[in-house]
Amino acid sequence: MAKPRDIPDLHADDAFAAAAAKVVAVRAQELADHSHNVLDTSDIERVHDMRVATRRLRAVLEIFAPCFPKRQHGEVLRDVKALADALGERRDPDVHIAALDTFAAAVKPSSRAGVRLLGGRFRDEQAQANADLAQALQRAEESDLQGRLRALAEGPAG
Amino acid sequence: MRARRVKGLDPAASLADNAERIVRTRLDELYSFAPKALNPKRVKALHDMRIAAKRLRYVLEITSFCFGPYASTATKRAKELQDLLGEIHDCDELLPRVRAVQRELRDGDVDGLLELGADADDLDRALGARVRHADAYGGLEVLAVWLEARRTLLFERFLDRWKTLQRQAFRERLERALDDRVVETESLPPSSDGQVQSRMTA
């Protein structure tokens, strides 16, 4: 899992609003950097890293909520949550499939049929969740979520 | 689970002042689930405690540098707790799915046998050999047993971890770290004798 990036030039005596601008800018960039090839189900770590980046961004948006214009902040937070939910829906079957594959390899051959059958169900859910995630990513792009995050980060300190 | 509202946050006040309020609230929130979550059957309390640990971890990830050194240790402890509770949560999510698929297969097989023996006065015992998903039940039962055992083991690890945190005075030490604000040293230009000076800033 990706470690959180340090926030450059962040100080304990920064005004909360100034700190909010610095932190949200870095966490928004982390989200952008982890948003590539997440629909590739052959490498489930990509979706995991983006999900973690989304959770961290959501957390800082909640922590620093009083520093931002209410409406602008509310809309961005809602869209980040929607993206996080779509990533979570993809991540859950990813985890179960990986666990069931490992389990099936470890048990007696006679026990594998049921485990593989359940794994097949999760593969169907993964495919559906991937299609939903593709739509969520498209919505984020069309609504310029990154641009709105940048605008939010530039707002409170100035 | 909705996060508890943090009172008195002020955008114009310092990061450290605001962070202290948030961490204290998130710490209270974490401990509020402790009595219920120590019961292995309280699945929701365990789930809520995981969310509370995650919230505490994320605020500390950003602001622990404002406080005494234990705040950084507390970030790691909160993450460990969150991870362990996450593994328990995965078992709690997967086990009902296993049981549901088992039930579905069994119900389907019962219907299948009834169709085969619909015209008979009694069901032919030989039809037992034609139960379609017999192997699948067995595999799913093995998986369910393994998940129950893993969940029990992980819950014991969680209890051990929680007791260790209490023994190590996790809460008290983090609260002391919050009182122990870091004083940043800001470098100034070298003095006339060439020695580096420093100034303490609150």
Image (cartoon, coloured by chain):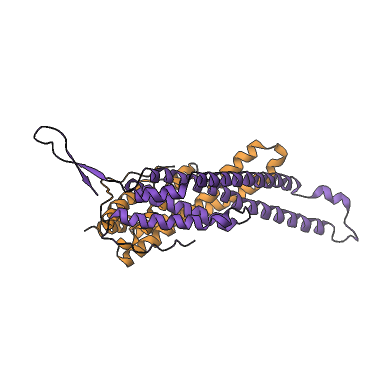
Chain colours: A orange, B purple
Q: State the image coordinates of residue B83 (x, y, percent, origin top left).
A: 51, 46
Q: State the image coordinates of residue B42 (x, y, percent, origin top left).
A: 60, 57
Nearer-the-camera pick, A81 or B152: B152
Tell me: residue A149, above or below residue A111: below
Q: Is residue A25 left or right of residue A122?
A: left
Give the quarter of the image for residue A79.
bottom left
Tell me: residue B24, above or below residue B168: below
Most extreme residue toward the left, as rendered? B192
Q: Residue at x 87, y 61 (%)?
A: B119
Q: Is residue B169 left or right of residue B109?
A: left
Give the total of numbered labels: 0
Res A64 seen here: yes
Nearer-the-camera pick, B61 or A120: B61
Q: Residue at x 63, y 40 (%)?
A: A103
Q: Residue at x 48, y 41 (%)?
A: A43
Nearer-the-camera pick, A150 or B24: B24
Give the quarter of the image for residue B122.
bottom right
Q: State the image coordinates of residue B34 (x, y, percent, origin top left).
A: 54, 55
Most extreme residue toward the top, as rendered? B194
Most extreme residue toward the bottom, as rendered? A71
Res A131 seen here: no
Q: State the image coordinates of residue B131 (x, y, percent, origin top left).
A: 79, 50
Q: Is residue A151 left or right of residue A133?
A: left
